[in-house]
Image: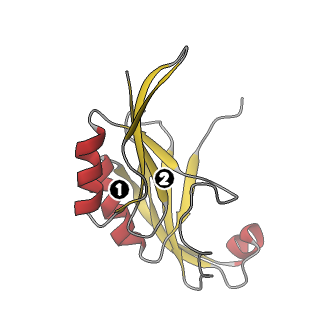
Amino acid sequence: MPTKYSHTNVISEDWQKLAKFYIEVFDCKPVPPERDESGEWLEKGTAVKNAHLKGVHLRLPGWGDDGPTLEIYSYHEMLDKPSQPRANRKGFGHLAFHVDDVKTKLEDVVSSGGHRLGEIATSKIEGAGTITFTYVTDPEGNIIEIQNWE
């Protein structure tokens, strides 16, 4: 079988609250079953001593029933997140969602507990089109790009 993208994982302070945000704001759909996992197999695979997690997979919008998911988990014991969100911090930068109206989606994010990170900007990218975008954060500080290409 060829390589196929599967999911992106977010470790959350409160997986139920964060999942609700992505369901309501970005139209993600829960993929049962909810997870409550522990055991030697999980400890071995994650290298986390006494690993115990709970959470859910959310189907990302626009890709149908077999598309990739956003996996939102909380571990029984978790490490703190480093510093404040910054677009140029090393590691994974952001999730991106294409939307019909960036301004309206920005308002949805903020009214649902997320936060502005940048301002709405528009630029013509030669050979690609015109992008309107901004960066925001979800309620736990994970960066999201909301964008529209014309």
Q: Is residue 2 above or below residue 45?
A: above
Q: Is mark 2 in CB contact (under 8 Å) with mark 1?
A: yes
Q: Residue at x 30, y 46 (%)?
A: 27
Q: Tag 1 or tag 2, which sits nearer the N-term? A: 1
Q: Is residue 1 visible?
A: no
Q: Is residue 88 left or right of residue 97?
A: right
The quadrant where residue 30 appears: bottom left
Q: Amino acid at mark 2?
A: Leu
Q: Kindly identify which numbered label has been placed on residue 70.
A: 2
Q: Residues within 10 Å of mark 1 (few under 14, many from 20)?
A: many
Percent across and percent down for residue 140 are 44, 70
Helix, strand or loop status at disc 2:
strand
Tag 1 residue = 22
Q: Residue at x 24, y 53 (%)?
A: 108
State the residue in front, 39 or 49.
49
**Is 60 situated left or right of 4 in this image?**
left
Q: Position of residue 96 (x, y in %)?
A: 47, 43
Look at the image and tell me in which quarter the C terminus lies. Answer: top left
Q: Residue at x 68, y 85 (%)?
A: 50
Q: Position of residue 2 (x, y in %)?
A: 72, 29
User: Spatial distance from mark 2 to mark 1, Cα to Cα?
Assistant: 9 Å
| Dot 1: element | helix
Residue 37 shown left or right of residue 91 in the figure: left
In the image shown, does 96 or 60 lie closer to the viewer?
96
User: If the image is split into quadrants, where does the N terminus sit?
Assistant: top right
Looking at the image, can residue 80 be seen? Answer: yes
